[in-house]
Amino acid sequence: MFLRKYIGDKTFYKKMLVITLPILVQNVITNFVSLIDNIMVGQIGTEQMSGVAIVNQLMFVFNLCIFGGVSGAGIFTAQYHGKGDRKGVRDTFRAKLIIVAVISLVCILAFALFDSELISLFLHKGEDNLDLAATLGYGKSYLMIMLLQIPLFALSQAYSGTLRETGSTVLPMTAGVVAVFVNVSLNWVLIFGNLGAPKLGIEGAAVATVIARFTETFIVMFATHINTKKYLFAKGLYRSLRIPKVLIKDIVKKGFPLMLNEILWALGTTMLVQCYSLRGLEVISAQNISSTVSNLFFCSFFAFGSAISIIVGQLLGAGELERAKDEDRKIIFTTVVVCVVVGGVMAALSPLIPDIYNTTDTVKSIATSMLLISSAMIPVHGFVHTCYFTLRCGGKTMVTFLFDSVYVWTVCVPVAFILARFTVLPIIPLFAIVQSVDIIKCVVGYVLVKKGVWVNNLVENNE
C-alpha cells in the first residue's frame, strides 16, 4: 500500500525526469557558475564582495517580481496547453510581456533614483571594522551597469516560462547553460584583466552578466521563432497584443495574488537579510557565501516544484483530477527523499567551502555555521516548496499568498526584527531560530495539500 501510494512506476519517473532533468541541469550549472563568479569577486576583497552581495539582494527582489508576474499568467499557460488550446497559450504569453515590461520600468526607476538609500540599509559596522563608504561606492557602480540586464532578464523569462509550461524544457536549459559559461568566461577576463583586457574588478563582473543575459535572451527568442512548427504558440505571436477580457479578469483574479506574493516574499526575505546585517558587514559577506552555496544545493527541490507546475497543472487542465492528486503526492515524497540525501552532502562540505574565499576568519566562521544550519533545513524547505507549487498549480493563489508571503511578514520578519533590534543574540542562534520557524509551514502545507483544496480545472469553461 505504501509503495503504491508514494512510489511511482517506471513510466511515472521517466516522465518526471524528462521534465525535471533539463531544469535541474540548468539550475545546477547556473548556480555552480554563480558560485564560481562569487568566488572570483571574493578574491578582490571583502568590501567589494559585500557591495556586490547587497546589489544582488536588490536584484533578487526584481527577479522574483518577474517570476511572480510570469507565473501568474503561467498557471493558465500550463492548463491551456493541457487542453490543447494554442490560442490560449499565445494570449497568456502576451499578458506576460505586458506584465514584465511594467515591472522592469518600475524597478529601473527605483534602483536608479534611490541607489544610495537602498544599499545603505545594509551597511553596519561589525567586528572587523570594514570600510562602509567604500562598500557603498562599489555597490553603486555595480548596480548602474546591472540595470542594463533588467529588460533582457524580463523578456527571457517570459519566453522560458512559456516554453517550460508547454513541456519544452530543453531550449531554456540550453540557453541558460550557454549564458552561464559566457558569464564565467567573461568574468575571468574582465574582473582580473586576463587575455589583454582591462582589469575592471566588480564592474567587469557586471558587464559580463549583461552580455551573458543578452546571449540567453537571443538564443531563446531566435530558436523559438525559427521553429514555430515545434513551438506552436510562437506562430503569429506578435500579430496582436490583444488579450481576451475574460482571461485578463482571470489573470488579475488568480495571477495578481501570486505576483503580489512573490514581491512581498522577496521583500520579506530581503528584510531578513537587513535584520542580519545589524550584526555587522561581515554578516552580509557570510550570508552572501552561504546563500550562494545553499542555492546550488537547493536546486534539488527547485526542479520538483517546476515538475508539479507542469505535470500536475496539465493533468488538472485535462480533467484528470484523481491522477493529478496521485502524481503530486509521489513528486512530493520523491522531493523529500532527495533533499535528505542532498542535505547530508551539503553538511559534509560546509566547513570546506568558505576557505576558498579571500576574506576574514570571522566571515568564514559565520558562513560555515550558516551553511550547516541551511543543510539541516533542506528537507523542510523541499517539502514546503512542493506544497506551495501544488497549491499554486490549482489556482489557489490566495491560499499561497497567505501560506508564503503573509507567513514571512507575520512570523519570520517579526521574529528576526525583534531578535536583531531588541536583543544581543549573536548572529548564528538568531539565524537558526529564524530558519526553524519554517517547520510550522510544513504542518500547514501538509494539511492544505491533503485536503485537496487545490484540485481545480481552471480552463474548463474558458474559450
Image: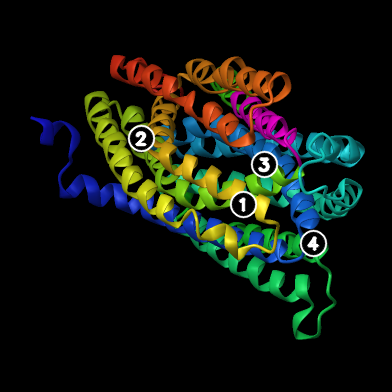
Q: Main secondary structure of the magenta part?
A: helix
- The image shows a total of numbered marks equal to 4
* Residue sticking out furthest to the bottom: 196
Mark 2 vs mark 1, foreground winner is: 1
Residue type marked 1: Ile
Instruction: Give the answer, above or below, for where 346 lies relative to 274.
Output: below
Whether 185 is among the magenta residues is no
Judged from the image, the secondary structure of the residue bearing numbered disc 4 is helix
Density class for disc 4 (Cα within 10 Å; few <14, some 14-19, many ≥20) is many
- CA–CA distance between discs 2 and 1? 38 Å
Residue 460 drawn at (x, y percent): 38, 22
Identify the residue shown where x is 43% and y is 36%. 377
Q: Which numbered dot is residue 289?
A: 1
Mark 3 vs mark 2, foreground winner is: 3
Q: Which residues are magenta?
A: 261-280
Instruction: Give the answer, above or below, for where 248 lies relative to 12.
Output: above
Mark 1 vs mark 3, foreground winner is: 1
Residue 77 drawn at (x, y percent): 48, 35
Q: Which numbered dot is residue 202?
A: 4
The residue closer to the viewer here, 337 or 27, is: 337
Identify the residue shown where x is 74% and y is 59%. 210
Density class for disc 3 (Cα within 10 Å; few <14, some 14-19, many ≥20) is some
Label located before the other in sequence (2 or 1): 1
Label located before the other in sequence (1 or 3): 3
Image quadrant assignment for residue 41: bottom right
- CA–CA distance between discs 1 and 3? 15 Å
Identify the residue position indicated by label 3 in the image. 60
Residue type marked 2: Gln
Identify the residue position indicated by label 2 in the image. 314
Mark 2 vs mark 4, foreground winner is: 4
